[in-house]
Image: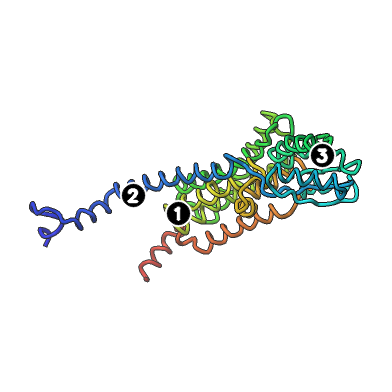
């Protein structure tokens, strides 16, 4: 019967036989990868361009004190909204101290104190809350005031550190933790394939701890770009790397060799642009600003940003997000560990007996 198949003995192969041969050759996965990589390149460029190329304010939470209810104050705030083409969400406070505390709690991005029945205004910015938002307000508020006859004084009450004038260093170190986190898991799956599930989790935690230390030490001690609260920043970076590595391991368990696709989509194409690290969340498209806080990159940036610039006002939410992703990824990996392409039999004799019994 051998001479009847696959065009043997000079018979031209049929279209179905040629397709079958192509599917079994290395050219099939290579062709699929070419198409996937092309699509991934477009998605990568599109996601970053969509979120970062032209940041536009959607909603800016702002504290107000003083004569904001007077005609001049109301006219100034309306003029500011028109100039920004966005909503300035006003949070009134009785005293400046209460408004400053709202900045420290990251509930507002600036404080407007309207004086002399709205004829003058003092704008307290918080550059550390969001450099892009602070720059936008610093440019727009005086221009609006000049147009309306309101004298506006601007000052930055919580500036960025000197080594991080654009406020991007936290985004970069978080990005490094995310990328190296899942690249490390990929390398473990290739070069340490026979690790048991427990060993794989432990080695992921080990490179996360060392990697987080290396990132923090380089940025703080070696370069002096950021003055980090070292222990807390190290913990956040290590947790981020571990989560990123375990997310890949989870997808590797679920999708095998195609695990890089959902990992890249979740962590890089969606997670990093929506993290608020490069562009403050009020300037992001609203769906990204909402989604980003629930993803590991956004949680990492959020926790690190508070640790560096708002010490003593840390929130539990970003840590709960990171812990939730760590628990989910570890649980899926552990429950479906038999599907993971790695691992080894701890007792080869018992495994052989088991297979013979079946």
User: Residues under labels 1 and 3: Cα distance?
Assistant: 56 Å
User: Residues under labels 3 and 2: Cα distance?
Assistant: 57 Å
Closest to the camera, between mark 2 and mark 1, is 2
Measuring 80% from the left and 45% from the top, which residue is drawn there? 75
Mark 1 lies on residue: 342
Measuring 58% from the left and 51% from the top, which residue is drawn there? 202
Q: Residue 29 carries which label?
A: 2
**Secondary structure found at label 3:** strand
N-terminal of the two: label 3 or label 2?
A: 2
Left or right: 64, with 320 as reference point: right
Could you tell me residue 15's position as x and y percent?
19, 56
Mark 3 lies on residue: 124
Measuring 80% from the left and 38% from the top, which residue is drawn there? 148
Along the viewing direction, whichever of 21 and 68 lies nearer the viewer: 68
Observer able to see residue 100: no
Along the viewing direction, whichever of 53 and 71 lies nearer the viewer: 71
**Secondary structure found at label 2:** helix
**Secondary structure found at label 1:** loop
User: Residues under labels 2 and 1: Cα distance?
Assistant: 21 Å
- Local crowd at mark 3 within 10 Å, few (<14), some, or many (≥20)? many
Could you tell me residue 155's position as x and y percent?
81, 34
N-terminal of the two: label 1 or label 3?
A: 3
- Local crowd at mark 1 within 10 Å, few (<14), some, or many (≥20)? many
Along the viewing direction, whichever of 55 and 192 lies nearer the viewer: 55
């Amino acid at each position: 019967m051998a001479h009847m198949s696959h065009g043997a003995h000079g018979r031209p192969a049929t279209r179905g036989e040629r397709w079958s041969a192509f599917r079994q050759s290395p050219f099939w996965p290579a062709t699929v990868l070419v198409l996937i990589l092309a699509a991934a390149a477009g998605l990568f460029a599109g996601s970053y361009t969509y979120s970062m190329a032209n940041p536009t304010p959607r909603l800016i939470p702002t504290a107000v004190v003083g004569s904001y209810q007077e005609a001049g104050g109301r006219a100034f705030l309306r003029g500011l909204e028109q100039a920004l083409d966005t909503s300035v969400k006003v949070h009134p406070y009785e005293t400046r101290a209460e408004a400053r505390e709202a900045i420290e709690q990251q509930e507002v991005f600036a404080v407007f104190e309207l004086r002399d029945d709205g004829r003058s205004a003092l704008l307290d910015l918080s550059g550390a809350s969001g450099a892009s938002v602070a720059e936008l307000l610093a440019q727009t508020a005086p221009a609006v005031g000049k147009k309306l006859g309101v004298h506006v004084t601007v000052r930055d009450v919580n500036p960025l550190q000197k080594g991080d004038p654009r406020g991007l260093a936290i985004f970069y170190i978080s990005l490094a933790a995310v990328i190296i986190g899942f690249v490390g898991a990929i390398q473990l799956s290739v070069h340490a394939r026979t690790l048991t599930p427990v060993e794989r989790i432990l080695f992921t935690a080990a490179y996360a701890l060392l990697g987080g230390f290396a990132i923090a030490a380089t940025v703080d001690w070696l370069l002096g770009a950021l003055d980090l609260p070292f222990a807390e920043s190290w913990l956040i970076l290590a947790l981020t790397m571990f989560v990123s590595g375990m997310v890949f391991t989870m997808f590797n368990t679920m999708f095998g060799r195609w695990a890089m696709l959902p990992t890249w989509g979740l962590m890089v194409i969606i997670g990093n642009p929506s993290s608020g690290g490069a562009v403050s969340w009020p300037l992001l498209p609203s769906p990204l600003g909402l989604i980003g806080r629930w993803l590991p990159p956004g949680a990492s940036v959020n926790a690190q940003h508070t640790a560096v610039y708002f010490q003593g006002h840390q929130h539990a939410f970003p840590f709960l997000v990171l812990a939730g992703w760590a628990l989910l990824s570890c649980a899926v990996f552990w429950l479906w560990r038999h599907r993971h392409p790695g691992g080894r039999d701890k007792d080869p004799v018992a495994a052989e007996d088991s297979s013979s019994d079946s």
